[in-house]
């Protein structure tokens, strides 16, 4: 392991800047802000999975005392279906139809109208008074039903192979000649897997408060994974210019990808505009479950061929991912990440974006990659069994390394995948004895990671302390890591650095918190800003000492002569130079805005032990070790936290979580009681091993760490269940009824 | 129907508020009382983000009617620290990074405090089952459980009675 040891703050478990607010209840999340004169917004939602909207009559609702405004799709900017208008990875022609149904209601829970009234109760009552004439249409929920020849078509304008189809897109990644490759194979395993849609499960429901002045100057308080995304999407959907909208990021109560798009903000903006009153909207948990994005359900077929010595010669994957009712499933993650941990000469990976009458999917931690990895890593387990090889040995023999051309295109620089395999193999967990009905599984995973736009402003206060403002909502401790980096560079105590998240009017454009990009990108702009400040501080010290700036060094929070040749002067501290600032050229501060590049992919290898209760069908995870190449753990506690949180979500996905549909096409379990996420008593301690192979393209060696830990989990659990029972499951979740069925069948 | 007038004690202070008959205690806390530290994650008693105590009994405030607070003693996250001095659980959560987004943290702390008052040296299993009603989606619970166990050990060693009254 290549660990930098001479740092004072990078790598330390410092107290996070926003910590005290969060342990005392002071932190303001999306639903915690109120305004004088504020009224409440509510959404009327479709009861039908698929229905043409023939007419909407809002007159009775508008006549109800206390109702101040009603909006429908007519008030939202229409983006015609035949022309794509992209904002990042989101297409506004689908986004405008997701925030409010236009021609048709496409899933139960699809917004039909929104009302603002003087109380929540009046707003809810008004929603009941809206008369909607629906022509109910046949619907399709599952992939097989949506792609069969006579399936009801959600969007007539979308065609696949020349005909209207629910297949909204196809993506292919190809390397070598897969047919030729399989001819060389001596052992081939091919299996088909299914997974169910699972929700990100953030505990904070979507919420916002919007105020619109008479001149259209708009302020939005909401929690999201990007205040600039909120500004841009709201501008597109309302027709307001972006310069009129100030989006203020509230503390965010979990997102995991699910808060990378808007649901309420455009509706609240239009209601506030119409009513002339600030409008607050808060989703119920049921609305979150019915109408916000889970990740895709899937059907995947993976075929892998190897020589008898374990050399993999060819791999093929076909991944059908559910988009929900509007196009945009994460096929790129499934197609592009699944085979990337391996050096395979012949690969063909194809994905299909499949529409059905479910809520539109949203990003979820390494979008698409866990679905692909589940299939690939389970097939590798069977391949290892067929070859009588240790599953980690099979992976080591085929592992991607520096110079490997990944299936999805790039040639890997120095990466740490092999290190994760070796660390897993050497871990005492891997050889610990197992009891009766216990089993052990391993799996690996890869995520691209991301760079992109980031802005920061670093200012020195008059008393010589530091305020850093960045533009990315802090979803899991990024402010703590930024404080460590800035303190390290300036050579001061980290408690002298405040780190704030700016709003869209106070900091430069910064892309979403997502894709495991935040610390990678913000550390770059904060480092460059701080370097500029240090250059200024050195210039000013040089001026005072009347020497050349080159002859000044910055160390331990003060300017020093670089060498005895430069002269002998007592050090000038940051506080002393800050006090002299007015006389020496003015305030000290610097901002940097970049489109960051050089984010390198991340790899993880996990070991999972399970015990199966064959009477009740319950699979319990009894031990778990996650090993990951984390680049550089700037704040190790929050890196471990990302790994542990990803593992817990994966265990839920593997063992319990799923949307259960009724015969009428509605979700039957839209709450935390029946949509069963892991609770504290379901899990063991989640051990982590951070392998540090620094990213050579980053000033601190940072790699994204948030997405990778979800990628291997489902396969690790499934392989452990096989090891315990001698039976393989090809469908998730492996919940008690399904385990019992398998055991009894 | 006219609003109800309720007199109660919140975090040791006598308080009065008006509420609708159907308002929950969580509605009252977050609304007229302005105590937004208790969070609404589900409104059905499944997530624990609104955990408070009434007469030292841990409950989900979304499952209690506001009117039921009459004459009782309510404690919320806002009453946990003594002025500037954080409760040992709050301090340990910070030191051990037992929070990520922080939305479940208020409820986790109130529930953990209620546990330690009842059972000052819980086992890991006891902590896990006691906190099974408090959902956290960020941490995987590992650091939360460790922070509670370590606080219990330290509080017993140091005899931090001021927080156990």
Image (cartoon, rainbow, N blue to C red):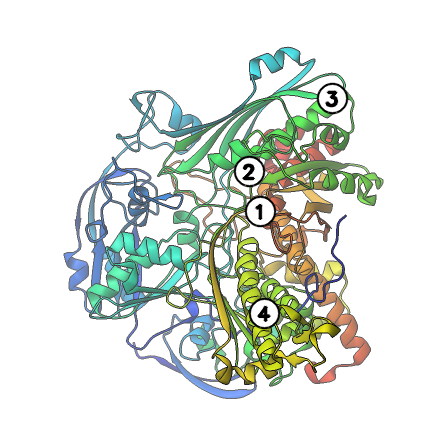
Mark 1 closeness class: few <14, some 14–19, many ≥20 residues within 10 Å: many
Mark 2 closeness class: few <14, some 14–19, many ≥20 residues within 10 Å: many
Question: Which residue ends up furthest to the top in the rendered image?
Answer: A183
Mark 4 closeness class: few <14, some 14–19, many ≥20 residues within 10 Å: many
Quarter of image, res A230 = bottom left
Please give the name of the residue rendered at 67% of the width and 37% of the height, measured from the top-left corner.
Answer: A444
Task: Give the residue pinned by disc 2.
Answer: A369
Q: Secondary structure at mark 1?
A: loop
Task: State the residue in front, A188 or A297.
Answer: A188
x and y, in percent, of residue A139 in the image: 33, 33
Q: Earlier in the sequence, mark 1 or mark 3?
A: 3
Q: Chain of mark 1?
A: A
Task: State the residue in front, B156 or A552.
Answer: A552
Q: Secondary structure at mark 2?
A: helix
x and y, in percent, of residue A318 in the image: 51, 25
Q: Earlier in the sequence, mark 2 or mark 4?
A: 2
Tag 1 and tag 2, C-beta contact below 8 Å: yes
Q: Chain of mark 4?
A: A
Tag 2 and tag 4, C-beta contact below 8 Å: no
Task: Give the residue pinned by disc 4.
Answer: A534
Tag 1 and tag 3, C-beta contact below 8 Å: no
x and y, in percent, of residue A91 in the image: 34, 42
Quarter of image, res A717 = top right
Task: In the rendered view, tell whether residue A171 sits above or below residue A454.
Answer: above
């Amino acid at each position: 392991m290549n660990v930098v040891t001479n740092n004072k703050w990078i790598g330390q478990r410092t107290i996070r800047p926003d910590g005290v607010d969060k342990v005392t209840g002071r932190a303001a999340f999306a639903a915690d802000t109120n305004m004088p004169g504020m009224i409440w917004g509510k959404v009327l939602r479709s009861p039908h999975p698929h229905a043409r909207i023939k007419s909407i009559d809002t007159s009775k609702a508008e006549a109800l005392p206390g109702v101040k405004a009603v909006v429908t799709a007519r008030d939202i900017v229409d983006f015609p279906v035949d022309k794509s208008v992209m904002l990042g990875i989101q297409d506004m022609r689908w986004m405008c139809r997701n925030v409010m149904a236009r021609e048709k209601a496409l899933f139960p829970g699809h917004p039909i109208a929104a009302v603002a009234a003087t109380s929540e109760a009046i707003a809810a009552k008004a929603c009941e008074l809206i008369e909607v004439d629906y022509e109910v249409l046949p619907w399709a929920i599952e992939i097989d039903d949506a792609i069969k020849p006579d399936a009801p078509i959600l969007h007539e304008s979308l065609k696949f192979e020349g005909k209207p189809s629910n297949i909204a897109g196809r993506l292919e990644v190809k390397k070598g000649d897969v047919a030729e490759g399989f001819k060389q194979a001596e052992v081939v395993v091919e299996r088909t897997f299914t997974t169910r849609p699972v929700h990100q499960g953030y505990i904070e429901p979507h919420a916002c408060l919007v105020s619109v002045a008479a001149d259209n100057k708009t302020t939005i308080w909401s929690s999201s994974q990007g205040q600039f995304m909120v500004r841009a999407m709201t501008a597109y959907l309302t027709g307001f210019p972006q310069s009129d909208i100030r989006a203020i990021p509230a503390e965010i109560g979990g997102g995991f990808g699910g808060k990378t798009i808007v649901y309420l903000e455009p509706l609240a903006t239009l209601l506030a505009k119409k009513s002339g009153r600030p409008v607050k909207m808060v989703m119920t948990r049921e609305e979150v479950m019915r109408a916000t994005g889970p990740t895709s359900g899937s059907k995947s077929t993976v075929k892998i061929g190897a020589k008898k010595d374990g050399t993999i010669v060819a791999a093929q994957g076909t991944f059908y991912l559910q988009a929900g009712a509007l196009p945009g499933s994460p096929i790129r993650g499934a197609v592009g990440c699944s085979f990337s941990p391996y050096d395979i000469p012949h690969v063909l990976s194809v994905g299909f974006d499949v529409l059905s009458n479910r809520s539109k999917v949203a990003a979820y931690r390494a979008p698409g990659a866990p679905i692909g990895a589940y299939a690939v890593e389970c097939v590798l387990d069977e391949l290892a069994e067929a070859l009588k090889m240790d599953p980690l040995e099979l992976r080591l023999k085929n592992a991607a390394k520096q110079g490997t051309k990944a299936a999805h295109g790039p040639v890997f620089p120095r990466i740490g995948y092999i290190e994760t395999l070796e660390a897993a193999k050497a871990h005492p967990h891997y050889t610990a004895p197992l009891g009766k009905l216990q089993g052990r599984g391993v799996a690996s995973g890869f995520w691209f990671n991301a760079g992109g736009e980031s802005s920061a402003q670093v200012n020195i206060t008059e008393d010589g302390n530091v305020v850093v403002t960045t533009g990315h909502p802090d979803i899991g401790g990024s402010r703590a890591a930024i404080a460590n980096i800035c303190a390290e560079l300036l050579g001061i105590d980290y408690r002298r650095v405040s780190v704030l998240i700016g709003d869209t009017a106070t900091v430069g454009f910064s892309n979403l918190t997502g894709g495991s990009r935040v610390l990678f990108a913000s550390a770059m702009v904060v480092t460059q800003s701080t370097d500029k400040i240090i250059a200024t501080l050195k210039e000013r010290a040089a001026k005072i000492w009347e020497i050349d700036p080159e002859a000044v060094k910055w160390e331990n929070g003060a300017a020093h002569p670089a060498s005895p040749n430069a002269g002998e002067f007592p050090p000038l501290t940051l506080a002393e130079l800050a006090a002299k600032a007015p006389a020496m050229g003015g305030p000290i501060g610097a901002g940097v805005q970049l489109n960051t590049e050089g984010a390198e992919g991340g790899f993880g290898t996990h070991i999972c032990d399970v015990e199966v209760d064959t009477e009740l069908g319950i699979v319990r995870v009894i031990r778990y070790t996650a090993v990951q190449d984390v680049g550089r753990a700037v704040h190790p506690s929050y890196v471990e936290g990302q790994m542990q949180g990803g593992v817990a979500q994966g265990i839920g996905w593997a063992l319990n979580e799923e949307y259960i549909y009724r015969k009428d096409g509605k979700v039957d379990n839209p709450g935390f009681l029946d949509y069963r996420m892991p609770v504290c008593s379901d899990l063991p301690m989640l051990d982590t091993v951070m392998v540090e192979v620094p990213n050579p393209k980053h000033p601190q060696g940072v790699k994204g760490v948030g997405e990778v830990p979800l990628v291997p989990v489902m396969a690790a659990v499934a392989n452990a269940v096989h090891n315990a029972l001698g039976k393989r499951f090809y469908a998730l979740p492996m919940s008690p009824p399904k385990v019992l069925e398998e055991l009894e069948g | 129907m006219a609003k109800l007038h309720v007199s109660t004690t919140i975090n040791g202070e006598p308080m009065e508020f008006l509420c609708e008959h159907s308002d929950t205690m969580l509605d009252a806390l977050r609304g007229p009382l302005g105590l937004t530290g208790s969070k609404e994650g589900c409104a059905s008693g499944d997530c624990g983000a609104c955990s408070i105590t009434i007469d030292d009994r841990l409950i989900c405030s979304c499952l209690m009617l506001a009117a039921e607070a009459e004459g009782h003693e309510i404690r919320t996250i806002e009453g946990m620290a003594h002025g500037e001095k954080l409760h040992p659980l709050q301090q340990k959560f910070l030191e051990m990074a037992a929070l990520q987004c922080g939305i479940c943290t208020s409820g986790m702390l109130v529930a953990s405090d209620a546990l330690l008052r009842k059972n000052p040296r819980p086992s890991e299993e006891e902590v896990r089952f006691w906190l099974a009603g408090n959902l956290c989606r960020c941490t995987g619970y590992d650091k939360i459980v460790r922070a509670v166990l370590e606080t219990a050990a330290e509080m017993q060693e140091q005899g931090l009675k001021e927080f156990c009254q």
